[in-house]
């Protein structure tokens, strides 16, 4: 009896756990959350015209049947059947370089930030006095009392990188950034971090048709000749069509 009650409570706990888990969803306002349209099938009851053989009588010259002849014709009546219908819904997921934790998308660093924290994909924000890509080097200097320095901004203890504006990079900010379309410029390497919807070495190219979002890694779900916004994935319908997709 006790074992039976214990099993019931365990099952109830598992059901409650999965119900609570299913209610969690990513925050669409989180800038690290990307979304895409996906299709799914639902079972519906649909009507259709069902053919059947209808017998009717007409007057004729058949004396044996009292001048009444039997005729057949195909008629239709409304019937019902179960069918599948394709529906669409927007599905949220973490952008590339982030992983899901509860209802948030957390940046992922392949190397542990030893004396700091991960602030963006493979970028550590170091505690004062620490530097290096993983904040394990003690030669870095902080930007001020109690103010941490970015690991990626000072690879060899040279503070000249920290003073660069958004249009320059390199030692003493001697190089001009070539990034386009609101892309971010790495102050050390000059590499461009493209905004949503752009790609290329300088982020000068739009996503290929059929793709959108960060790194152009998401697939558009538009139909019937609709065009897909290269940044958000929103569908712009062709003339004569309406709807989300």
Image (tube, rainbow, N blue to C red):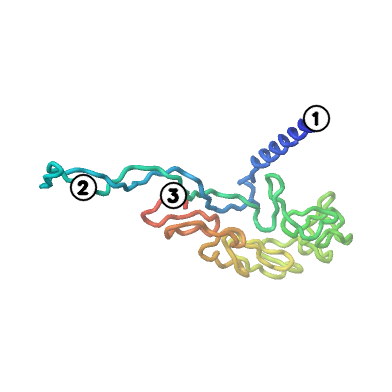
- Horizontal and vertical percent for residue 67? 12, 43
124 and 140: which is toward the camera: 124
Query: Crowding near pointer 2: few (<14 within 10 Å), some, many (20+)?
Result: few
Q: Is residue 239 left or right of residue 188?
A: left
Circle 2 sits in a helix, a strand or a loop, which is it?
A: strand
Q: Name the element at disc 3.
A: loop
Residue wearing tag 3: 243
Q: Quadrant of the N terminus?
A: top right
- In this rendering, position of residue 55 left or right of residue 122: left
State whether residue 138 is above or below residue 79: below
In the displayed structure, 11 sits above or below 51; it is above
Nearest to the eye among marks 1 and 3: give it: 1
> Residue 79: image x %, image y %?
37, 43
In this orientation, which residue lies closer to the viewer: 220 or 16? Answer: 16
Determine the CA span between mark 1 and mark 2. 74 Å
Please state which of the two labelled residues, at mark 1 or mark 2, is closer to the viewer.
Answer: 2
User: Residue at image x 24%, y 44%?
Assistant: 55
Mark 3 vs mark 2: which is more N-terminal? 2
Give the numbered dot on residue 245: none
Badge number at residue 71: 2
Residue found 72% across the figure and 54% down from its top:
107
Task: Give me the C-alpha separation between circle 3 and circle 2.
Answer: 49 Å
Q: Examine the rendered structure and indicate whether residue 26 appears above or below residue 191.
A: above
Give the labeled residue for mark 1: 2
Residue 183 % position (x, y): 62, 62
* Label 1, label 3: how far apart the Cα atoms are: 57 Å
| In this view, 143 is above or below 17 | below
The residue positioned 69% from the left and 36% from the top of the image is 16
Mark before the other along the chain sequence, 1 or 2: 1
């Amino acid at each position: 009896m006790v074992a039976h009650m214990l099993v019931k409570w365990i099952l109830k706990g598992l059901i409650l756990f999965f119900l609570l888990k299913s209610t969690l969803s990513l925050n669409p306002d989180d800038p690290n959350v990307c979304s895409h349209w996906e299709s799914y099938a639902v079972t519906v009851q649909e009507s259709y015209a069902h053919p059947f053989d209808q017998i009717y009588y007409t007057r004729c010259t058949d004396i044996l049947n009292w001048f009444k002849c039997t005729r057949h014709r195909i008629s239709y009546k409304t019937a019902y059947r179960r069918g599948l219908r394709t529906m669409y819904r927007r599905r949220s997921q973490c952008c590339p370089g982030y992983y899901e934790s509860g209802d948030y998308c957390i940046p992922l660093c392949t190397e542990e930030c030893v004396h700091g924290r991960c602030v963006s994909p493979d970028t550590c924000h170091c505690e004062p006095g620490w530097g290096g890509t993983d904040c394990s080097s003690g030669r870095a200097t902080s930007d001020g009392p109690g103010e941490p320095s970015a690991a990626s901004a000072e690879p060899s203890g040279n503070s000249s990188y920290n003073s660069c504006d958004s249009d320059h990079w390199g030692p003493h900010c001697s190089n001009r950034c070539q990034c386009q379309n609101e892309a971010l410029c790495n102050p050390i390497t000059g590499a461009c971090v493209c905004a949503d919807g752009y790609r290329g070495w300088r982020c000068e190219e739009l996503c290929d048709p059929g793709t959108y979002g960060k790194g152009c890694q998401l697939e558009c779900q538009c139909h019937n000749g609709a065009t897909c916004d290269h940044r958000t994935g929103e569908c712009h319908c062709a003339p004569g069509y309406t709807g989300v997709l």
